[in-house]
Image (tube, helix red, strand yellow):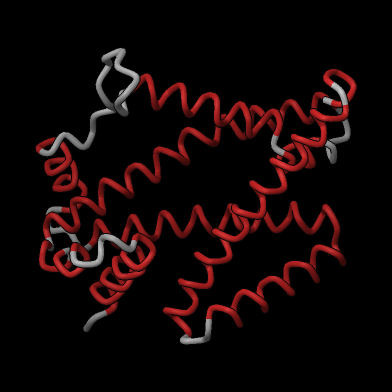
Amino acid sequence: MEKRFGPWARIYAVVCFLLTQFARMGTIFFGIALSLQALTGFSMASIMIVIGVCIIFYTVLGGMEAVIWTEVVQGIIKTLGALLILFLVIKEIPGGFSQVLDIAKADNKLSLGSLSPNSTESTFWVILFYGFFINLNNFGMDQNYIQRYHTATSSKQASKSVWLCVAIYVPASLLFFIIGTSLYAFYHVHPEMIEPVKKIVSVPTTMIIFLCRGLLKNWYSP
């Protein structure tokens, strides 16, 4: 960017990227600490410090290889975790997945959105173009992706990795859409578990933890 537009463009891009990453990392750390605090009872500050030190430690020792293998392990754990969540949610719905489909159809939860050209609402086209351009940014300019391309032994291998990510992105997104629809059906079948959540809907993070606690209590109760 500096060669094409001058030093100001490079400085502007770096500053924007760093601010975005600080916000992103802060949000991720907050989410992790919030979840672990609910499970362990430790303070959020302590959890953030321990996690931060551990990440710095293994990154400094292992370098880029440690970062990549961490992503691989995370990908496997997240995928298996998502499948486990889907199984447990459907297991607690009388009628199983067929009941999920019936509820989703009745409440129009299987629709991909209106095909209207209206750009002021979450239509199919708005979501499609948003997804396209946000991922174009991720795959083409985000340093988190670019640093991985640089570890490839050739341009062909880097290109192959991009298209592999694109191919995996679609079924992975579909999996989480199905989980969302299944959760909707779960609380439709168990409305008594959603009522307390409505009282704290103004605090999204607390609501998420409350929903998770409700599911865990239902799964593991005698």
The quarter holding residue 152 reads: top right
The mark tally for this picture is 0
Task: Indicate the position of residue 202 as horizontal and vertical percent values.
Answer: 28, 60
Identify which residue is drawn at 80% across, 24% down.
156
- The answer to whether residue 175 is above or below residue 1 is below
Residue 145 located left or right of residue 58: left
Task: Residue 109 in the image: state x and y as whole percent.
Answer: 21, 37
Left or right of 106, for residue 187: right
Q: State the image coordinates of residue 171 (x, y, percent, origin top left).
A: 46, 36
Q: Is residue 22 above or below residue 56?
A: above
Query: For the point 29% across and 78% down, which residue is it?
Result: 220
Q: Determine whether 121 is above or below 183 in the image.
A: above
What residue do we see at 21% from left, 84% from top?
222
Extreme residue toward the bottom, this view: 41
- Quick one: 30 or 98, which is closer to the camera? 30
Q: Determine which quarter of the picture holds residue 145.
A: top right
Q: Quadrant of residue 90?
A: bottom left
Horizontal side, residue 192 vs residue 64: left or right: left
Q: Quadrant of the N terminus?
A: top right
Residue at far front of view:
8
Residue 174: % across, % down? 40, 38
Q: Which residue is painted at 82% across and 54% down in the image?
A: 65
Nearer-the-camera pick, 1 or 207:
1
Please state which of residues 46 and 180 is positioned toward the viewer in this rendering. Answer: 46
